[in-house]
Image (cartoon, helix red, strand yellow):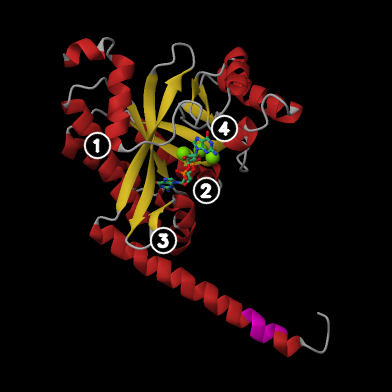
């Protein structure tokens, strides 16, 4: 808009867009390859009961073991996968891998936990409940092992249709939690209609506790809403003992965050679960 150099601007932008497009296409074809080539894997971040400190579940978080770039975090490919629709295939892989892992832990005699899988808005179609049911059946897994984390963006379009899908999922015995709660646009009048089990306080609020009065007020309000609506409430991104103390005092049910554990490889999570649930591990090993 400086005038005179408009042609340059156009050329600059289109070159920029071109590079962006090329980068997108590179990642997309890489991700397709990754799906077929076993380059995706899951890490598991434990979730804890705030009262007794025991592991009650885990969140499965996808990573991409890229031959050149190493371990790529989801932030670097999930948004693109969402934009292109490839997230549906990624989601199918994640559900399959999570159920296979849960089945393995179940067969190993580990105490039952709830394993949460993140589901993108694009995956939240009328095909999802059937796919979930089919996967559980194939692995012989009780639905109580599985939880789906959905974000508010899932709930923005066609609310009746979304609630219908939610109802079909919860009818299977699979629980739903509302991830990153408070960061989206879901209205409170809908919230009461959602058959959800748990509200997840987003890390962006946890981060300001206890120093930021607004974050404290928001966290308290979310906990209060959850309690009134008879939902459980979990705080994500808990990194300090001060945050933990505040959340405990405020009546939060569960916590997840680096204070307790980063997302772990399957073996490390399994170890944590054994230690957590079976006292006298040393004597057993002897
Ligand atoms: P999310 O579902 O909100 O997951 C929580 C993110 O916060 C994870 O990052 C986790 O590692 C990180 N986190 C947990 N505790 C702490 C903490 O105490 N401090 C800090 N700084 N971070 C913490 P991650 O694994 O990089 O995942 C990022 C996002 O990618 C997830 O946010 C989720 O939206 C998406 N994602 C991950 N796996 C999948 C998947 O399988 N499918 C889909 N659709 N999305 C996924
Ligand atoms: Mg999540
Ligand atoms: Mg979250
Ligand atoms: Mg979050």
The residue under label 4 is: 191
Closer to the chain start, of discs 4 and 3, is: 3
Instruction: Name the outermost residue toward the right.
Output: 3
Q: Earlier in the sequence, mark 3 or mark 1?
A: 3
Q: In terms of depth relative to the viewer, which is nearer, 36 or 262?
A: 262
Q: Position of residue 98 (x, y in %)?
A: 29, 39
Give the alpha-carbon distance from disc 2 to disc 3, as whole Å. 19 Å
Q: Which residues are magenta?
A: 9-13
Label 2: element kind: loop
Provide the residue designation for mark 2.
158
Q: Position of residue 68 (x, y in %)?
A: 36, 63
Residue 130, visible in the rendered structure? no
Decide which of 135, 97 is in the foreground and name it.
97
Name which of mark 4 and mark 2 comes first in the sequence. 2
Q: Is residue 49 above or below residue 21?
A: above
Report how far apart the C-alphas of labels 4 and 2 lie in the structure.
14 Å
Residue sitting at x 45%, y 54%: 78
Q: Is mark 2 within 8 Å of ligand 1?
A: no
Lower position in the chain sequence, tag 1 or tag 4: 1
Q: Which residue is mark 3?
A: 85
Give me the disc on residue 101: 1
Asked if 198 appears above or below 135 in the picture, the reply is: above
């Amino acid at each position: 808009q400086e005038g005179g150099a408009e042609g340059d601007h156009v050329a600059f932008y289109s070159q920029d867009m071109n590079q962006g497009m090329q980068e997108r296409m590179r990642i997309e074809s890489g991700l397709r390859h990754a799906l077929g080539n076993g380059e995706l894997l899951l890490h598991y971040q434990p979730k804890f009961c705030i009262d007794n400190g025991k592991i009650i579940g885990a969140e499965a978080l996808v990573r991409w073991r890229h031959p050149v770039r190493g371990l790529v975090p989801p932030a670097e490919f999930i948004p693109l996968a969402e934009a292109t629709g490839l997230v549906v295939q990624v989601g199918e892989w994640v559900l399959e891998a999570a159920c296979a892992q849960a089945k393995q832990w179940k067969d190993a005699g580990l105490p039952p936990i709830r394993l949460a899988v993140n589901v993108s808005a694009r995956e939240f179609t009328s095909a999802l409940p059937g796919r979930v049911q089919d996967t559980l059946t194939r692995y012989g897994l009780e639905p109580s092992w599985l939880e789906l984390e959905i974000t508010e963006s899932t709930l923005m379009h066609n609310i009746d249709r979304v609630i219908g899908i939610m109802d079909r999922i919860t009818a299977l015995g699979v629980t739903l939690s509302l991830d990153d709660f408070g960061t989206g646009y879901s209205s409170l009048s809908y919230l009461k209609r959602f058959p959800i089990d748990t509200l997840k306080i987003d890390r962006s609020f946890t981060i300001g506790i206890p120093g930021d009065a607004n974050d404290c007020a928001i966290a308290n309000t979310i906990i209060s809403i959850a309690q009134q609506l008879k939902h459980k409430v979990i705080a994500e991104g808990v990194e300090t003992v001060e945050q933990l103390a505040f959340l405990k005092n405020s009546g939060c049910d569960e916590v997840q965050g680096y204070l307790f554990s980063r997302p772990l490889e399957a073996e490390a999570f399994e170890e944590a679960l054994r230690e957590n649930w079976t006292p006298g591990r040393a004597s057993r090993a002897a």
